Image (cartoon, rainbow, N blue to C red):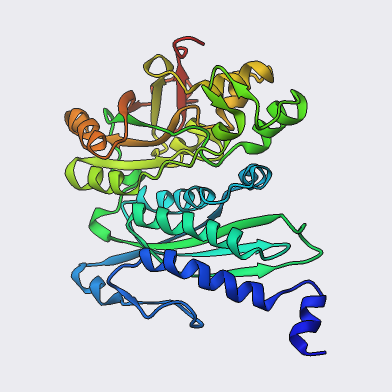
């Protein structure tokens, strides 16, 4: 028996892996940038860094992430061509918050059994999302792990690299009292809090993914698999055309905790919930699971996927720029000096009011 057949008998199919690579090539080719050198199949992806000479002091930014238990929904529905948008969104939008342009991305797919068509569908979504974000899909790895993962189970992760000139770096050091908090609408749950959502709606309530939910206007599965919105191009335009000082990607931990990551310790931000109504899925989780609102807000994005801290004179321009990129935005609050008696709000975010309809 050949080594290849012996390996296949152990649960790893080199033939299936090779077929998956052939199927994904067409999608990877679409996600190129001029700086890419060569194609897939090498030991390393190559990216021409000579363009960085145009920067006065280029800073490289990097991020690594996955999509959490949202993959369980994709697997249950046997729909795999959108989870890539979730992966890319989680990666590149962690870069743009500091003003960095995403340059390239690499992915990692681990599965119990390589099904070439399934792997190619995952990569298709990743490649299409890279095109939307403006970055190259430079390479990746597909690993077959029999005995560690079930035959129809997989997980996806990746890393991305971008660049920003040092004098255009966004962050807490630029934030000023009076800056407005520009909230950007999410497409839904994005890729965080799915352990809570699945527990509430699937495990505890016993709902099926094919259940039509009137409040959502579609099936539960369709709602839960809604791709993460990618803000990269919109946020880069925002940084370029307005006096935006910092941005925050609203992921695990919710709106307040993530905004606090870009607040100077001496300032506070007050956000008014009356300025927006979260999409119905958030209230559905709250009501079906009797989830206290503070718990919901520290787990889910509650309708806001990204925020920018912007000079108040540029508030209208910021909303207009984002609108040009198809992102609905509004002023949800402002940054101020902490004037609380004991300084208990220093570096903190305060949520006040209540969402209309809640």
In terms of depth relative to the viewer, which is nearer, 260 or 254? Answer: 254
Residue appearing at x 78%, y 83% in the figure: 5
In terms of depth relative to the viewer, which is nearer, 316 or 68? Answer: 68
User: Left or right: where does residue 126 sit relative to residue 245?
Assistant: right
Residue appearing at x 56%, y 17% in the figure: 214
Figure quadrant of the N terminus:
bottom right
User: Which quadrant of the view contains residue 223?
Assistant: top right
Location of residue 96 with respect to 29 vertically, above or below: above
Picture coordinates of residue 133, whole percent (x, y): 35, 53
User: Left or right: where does residue 185 sit relative to residue 3?
Assistant: left
In terms of depth relative to the viewer, which is nearer, 251 or 98? Answer: 251
User: Which quadrant of the view contains residue 187?
Assistant: top left
Give the farthest residue toward the top: 357
In terms of depth relative to the viewer, which is nearer, 153 or 199? Answer: 153
Residue appearing at x 82%, y 76% in the figure: 9
Picture coordinates of residue 221, whole percent (x, y): 61, 34
Location of residue 274 with respect to 336 vertically, above or below: above
Location of residue 42 with respect to 206 vertically, above or below: below
Residue appearing at x 61%, y 65% in the figure: 116
Give the total number of marks visible in the rendering.
0
Picture coordinates of residue 291, whole percent (x, y): 66, 20
Location of residue 350 with respect to 66 vertically, above or below: above
User: Which quadrant of the view contains residue 235?
Assistant: top left
Picture coordinates of residue 278, whole percent (x, y): 47, 22
């Amino acid at each position: 028996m050949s080594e290849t057949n012996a390996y296949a008998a152990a649960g790893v199919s080199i033939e299936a892996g090779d077929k998956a690579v052939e199927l994904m090539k067409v999608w990877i080719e679409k996600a190129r940038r001029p700086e890419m050198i060569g194609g897939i199949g090498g030991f390393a992806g190559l990216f021409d860094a000579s363009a960085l000479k145009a920067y006065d002091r280029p800073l490289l930014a990097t991020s690594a992430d996955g999509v959490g238990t949202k993959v369980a929904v994709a697997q249950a529905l046997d729909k795999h061509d959108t989870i890539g948008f979730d992966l890319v969104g989680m990666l590149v939008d962690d870069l743009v918050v500091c003003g960095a342009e995403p340059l390239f991305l690499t992915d990692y797919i681990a599965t119990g059994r390589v099904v070439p068509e399934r792997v190619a569908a995952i990569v298709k979504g990743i490649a299409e999302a890279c095109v939307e974000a403006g970055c190259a899909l430079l390479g990746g790895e597909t690993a077959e792990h029999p005995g560690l993962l079930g035959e129809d189970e997989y997980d996806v992760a990746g890393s991305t690299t971008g660049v920003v000139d040092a004098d255009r770096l966004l962050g807490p050091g630029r934030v000023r009292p009076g800056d407005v908090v520009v909230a950007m609408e999410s497409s839904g749950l994005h890729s965080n809090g799915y352990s809570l959502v699945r527990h509430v709606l699937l495990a505890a309530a016993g709902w099926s993914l094919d259940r039509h939910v009137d409040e959502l206007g579609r099936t539960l599965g369709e709602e839960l698999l809604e791709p993460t919105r990618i803000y990269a191009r919109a946020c880069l335009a925002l940084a370029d055309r307005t006096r935006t000082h910092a941005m925050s990607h609203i992921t695990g931990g919710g709106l307040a905790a993530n905004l606090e990551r870009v607040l100077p310790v001496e300032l506070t931000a007050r956000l008014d919930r009356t300025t927006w109504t979260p999409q119905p899925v958030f209230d559905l989780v709250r009501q079906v699971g009797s989830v206290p609102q503070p718990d919901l807000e520290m787990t889910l994005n509650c309708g806001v996927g990204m925020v920018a801290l912007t000079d108040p004179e540029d508030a209208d321009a910021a909303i207009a720029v984002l609108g040009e990129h198809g992102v609905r935005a509004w002023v949800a609050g402002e940054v101020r000096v902490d004037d609380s008696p004991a300084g208990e709000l220093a570096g903190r975010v305060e949520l006040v009011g209540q969402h209309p309809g809640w």
